[in-house]
Image (cartoon, grey):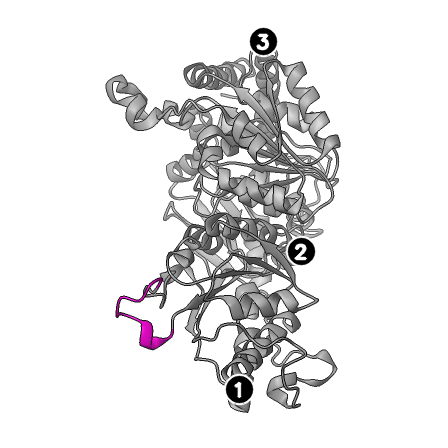
Amino acid sequence: MNKQQITHDYVTAFVDELVKAGLKDVCLCPGSRSTPLAMILAQHQEVRVWRHIDERSAAFFALGRAKVNQEPVALVCTSGTAAANFLPAVIEANYSRIPLVVLTADRPPELQNIGAPQAIDQMNLYGSHAKWSLEMALPEATEDMLRYVRTTAGRAVATAKHSPAGPVHLNFPFRKPLVPLAGNQAQQAKSLGRNGRENNQGYVTVTQADPKLAQAQLEELATELDKVEEGLIVCGPQIGEELPTSVIELANQLDFPILADPLSQIRCGKHNQELVIDNYDAFLRNHEFCDSYQSEVIIRFGAMPTSKAVFLYLKEHQYTRQLVIDGGAGWHDPTALASEFIYVDPDSFCSMLAGELKGRKHSTVHTDWSESWLKAAQVSKEAIEERLSDYDDLFEGRIFTELAELLPDKATLVAGNSMPVRDLDTFFANTDKEIKLVANRGANGIDGVVSTALGVSTTTDDPVILVIGDLSFYHDLNGLLAAKLHQLDLSIIVVNNDGGGIFSFLPQANYPEYFEELFGTPIGLDFEHAVQMYQGEFIKADTWPEFNSAIEASMSDGGLQVIEVCTDREINAARHREMWEVVTAALRQSNII
């Protein structure tokens, strides 16, 4: 059997099994050494190939699509530094539990460590950030080897997908010739390794059962929580759409207010939001409130919330019983104060515990505790809305109050890191519209955000809007190429304060002799030319009516639409501080503190 036939049979068995295991999408970057994977993936009718030029952008694009669909997406690249450019997205996928299957091509062993071009050490390239890494065997077409590659493919998809989801890495050394035989040239001798199991069944099926509390544990916990009046539920970033209904059912049984991070998917939707608090970041900045309202028990779901005020509230109440409910094997506790970790499916946990509590509490009236939290939220909301109406200029926080009104049902809003996601937290209020809120809060980086949003845009026919700072936008300008190549629809709001706006809130701002050069880092770029290079439409909005018109037009026109909103970093920081002061005054006036 010639070498092309061997490579063809080996890679074909692997790709066939990827598909049978459920993989449907691959982000493919050009290169020579990856030719066997690229050509056979491209030939498979059940695989959708998303072509990319830049590996870093490709990886974040894959992450965005996998984040929303919660299904693995494959990445393919050639050897050398091309594979290293996947690393930032692999890190984000690891920390935010997104399934990726990373397939890197490599030189064979005889070309390693001798100065051959594009030959670097790719063994365990992604370190601890990959759930599983494997150096694949050199291609052979023996029956044992074909069964091996099928088993490996099924295991890779299952490992990436199963809780906690994350990236896996398979490194493929290939010898020349790299071009496999065309499908009609390859021999078709039937065997288990070449053809897999009958009836299109996967070669190996991997099943993961959701862990559940034993009945005795459930009853004990219900009895303990039934005695608690002063409790909270804190919901941080999470991916699934099942939690909102069940966690609200649990909150109603316990009469615990829910502090809902925007990325918890609890602020938006038709579910009952009576106990859902959206503006806690404003009033938890007040030390008097935090001192006066110490919770007996806090039940926490998802990752640590975006809000620093929540983090500090938890830190200040060290003796509060904290239960962290995690469906995987993570350790989301940067406070080091959690008293209990319960590894159980969060949705099942809420439903079962709510069922156990049902009928134990007979009052339909909120306790003084929950009434106080709800009143603080309402007073804060009214104070914020009143102060916002006083600002005629383009205040960054108001972008999200405007979007909450403008976005239609089923839209998706993606927030960049640093200031946008924090303003999303503070200013995007509860709504009965089913709006999905997305951000990369695993590693919280500003890189790859444009590509992530473009990946998200491939999962829906409804509008997708990205709000991003100017530095983060610059960081991933390469990602705009995907919009042109694949004719994607995305509205991008670039908040251009000419630098790193978040640093204006940090102690570094007190050192003006260093601040601009080291932290503010203004870049002074005109993004209109870059957007036009990728055949996008660009508009600069100078007033709120212009902003609103531009958003509505961008959603109806489709394609790549970029709306620039220019703001002032110093004024923006001052306005945020004013907002906190206004909330404090309102809390005092209402006798909450």
Q: Position of residue 474 (x, y in %)?
A: 46, 33
Residue named by callout 2 = 351
> Which residue is rendered at x = 52% and y = 25% of the image?
495
In front: label 1 or label 2: 1
Q: CA distance from mark 2 to mark 3?
A: 44 Å
Q: Amino acid at mark 1?
A: Ala
- Per the rendered image, the range of residues in magenta is 108-118
Q: Is residue 233 visible?
A: no
The residue labelled by disc 1 is 141
Residue 533 located within the stretch drawn in magenta: no
The one nearer the camera, 248 or 226, is: 248
Q: Which mark is residue 430?
A: none
Q: Is there CB contact under 8 Å for labels 2 and 3? A: no
Closest to the camera, between mark 2 and mark 3, is 3
Q: Nearer the viewer, residue 41 or 567?
A: 41
Decide which of 533, 479 is in the foreground and name it. 533
**Image quarter of residue 50:** bottom right
Q: Residue 367's x, y, as percent?
A: 62, 35
214 left or right, relative to 200: left
- Height in image: 484 above or below 113? above
Question: In percent of the image, x 54 and y 44: which residue is there?
Answer: 451
Determine which residue is flagged by label 3: 390
Examine the rendering and report whether any part of residue 71 can be seen: yes
In space, the residues marked 1 and 2 are separated at their CA atoms by 50 Å
Asked if residue 439 lies left or right of residue 130, the reply is: right
**Mark 3 vs 1, N-terminal side:** 1
